[in-house]
């Protein structure tokens, strides 16, 4: 039996190699896992993993602000920045501070720890103060934060509380979380509520409804001229009888 020629061996090798090259992508496509959607961001899981934020997480849960954070960071492009006070920060508050807050003030306090945009530490070096928070505008008051510092030292001030920010819990946008060792009490809590807006001045000559109508009492029968007409009619009748009497006498 004749040995296969060199050309036959070469042809067979090329055929085998080509078949292998065609088979490898198909096999890889079958074994490669399908891409999965990223898991949603969850503020409670982040705080629990980091530890020492149990009080903050509990308040976020009780007020539903935590759900608001989750919804916004998973459905918006701007993201959020959260300043998370430690458990020690809450313990160092004056006795009764949280208990003396109304439910509305507790919500305002938590929203005051959240900025409506995701900021890196570098962003704060050039930011314009005061920076609005999610509490800004409530009760018609500013609820802003002020940031100062250089390089790796950054301070945040409320007007009555100032604390350094140095520990990053989460830095990847759309959610940045920074540790603060003091609760950021807003200066607005130490000031009286702004007075309610006074009603608009009445116009239109003092109309009761302010719509340009006169406030004078409606005309009575003595005011609308009907009484004067009756008096004129009575006087004319008496004069006519008197002239008729004089004519008869003549």
Image: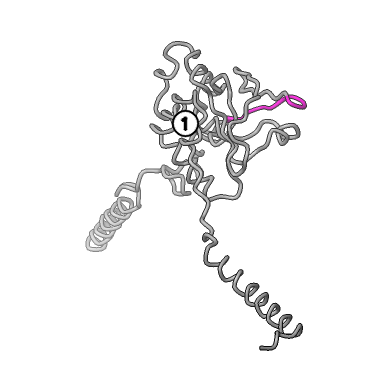
User: Looking at the image, is 146 positioned above or below residue 172?
Assistant: above
Which contiguous range is marked in magenta? 143-152
Assess whether residue 226 is covered by the magenta stretch.
no
Q: Quadrant of residue 9?
A: bottom right
- Looking at the image, which is closer to me, 121 or 201? 121
Q: Position of residue 2 (x, y in %)?
A: 69, 88
| In the image: residue 50, left or right of residue 150 | left
* Colouring of the image: one colour
- Quadrant of the image containing the N terminus: bottom right
Q: Main secondary structure of the magenta part?
A: strand
Q: Farthest residue toward the top?
A: 95
Q: Residue at x 51, y 33 (%)?
A: 111
| In the image: residue 224, left or right of residue 187 | left
User: Looking at the image, is 16 positioned above or below residue 48?
Assistant: below
Q: Residue at x 68, y 81 (%)?
A: 12
Q: Position of residue 127 (x, y in %)?
A: 72, 35
Q: Residue at x 76, y 82 (%)?
A: 6
- Looking at the image, which is closer to me, 64 or 129? 64
- Looking at the image, which is closer to me, 81 or 222? 81
Assess whether residue 148 is covered by the magenta stretch.
yes
- Quadrant of the image containing the C terminus: bottom left
Q: Quadrant of residue 175?
A: top right
Q: Position of residue 232 (x, y in %)?
A: 32, 54
In the structure shown, which secondary structural element does the residue marked by tag 1 occupy? helix
| In the image: residue 204, left or right of residue 64 | right
Q: Residue at x 30, y 50 (%)?
A: 227
Q: Residues within 10 Å of mark 1 (few under 14, many from 20)?
A: few
Q: Position of residue 50 (x, y in %)?
A: 52, 29
User: Looking at the image, is 243 positioned above or below residue 154?
Assistant: below
The residue beneath circle 1 is 48
């Amino acid at each position: 039996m004749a040995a296969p020629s060199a050309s036959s061996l070469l042809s067979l090798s090329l055929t085998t190699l080509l078949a292998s090259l065609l088979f490898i992508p198909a096999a890889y496509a079958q074994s490669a896992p399908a891409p999965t959607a990223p898991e949603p961001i969850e503020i409670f899981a982040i705080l629990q993993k980091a530890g020492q934020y149990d009080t903050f997480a509990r308040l976020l849960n009780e007020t539903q602000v935590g759900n608001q954070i989750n919804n916004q960071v998973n459905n918006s492009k701007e993201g959020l920045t959260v300043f998370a006070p430690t458990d020690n920060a809450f313990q160092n508050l004056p006795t009764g501070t949280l208990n003396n807050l109304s439910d509305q003030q507790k919500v305002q306090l938590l929203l005051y720890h959240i900025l409506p945009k995701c900021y890196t530490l570098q962003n704060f070096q050039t930011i314009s103060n005061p920076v609005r928070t999610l509490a800004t505008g409530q009760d018609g008051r500013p609820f802003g934060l002020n940031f100062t510092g250089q390089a790796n030292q950054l301070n945040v001030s409320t007007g009555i509380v100032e604390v350094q920010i140095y520990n990053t819990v989460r830095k990847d946008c759309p959610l940045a979380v920074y540790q603060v060792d003091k609760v950021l009490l807003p200066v607005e809590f130490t000031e009286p509520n702004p007075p309610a807006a006074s009603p608009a001045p009445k116009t239109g000559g003092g109309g009761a409804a302010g719509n340009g109508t006169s406030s004078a009492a409606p005309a009575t029968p003595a005011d609308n001229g009907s009484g004067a007409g009756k008096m004129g009619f009575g006087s004319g009748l008496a004069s006519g009888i008197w002239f008729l009497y004089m004519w008869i006498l003549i």
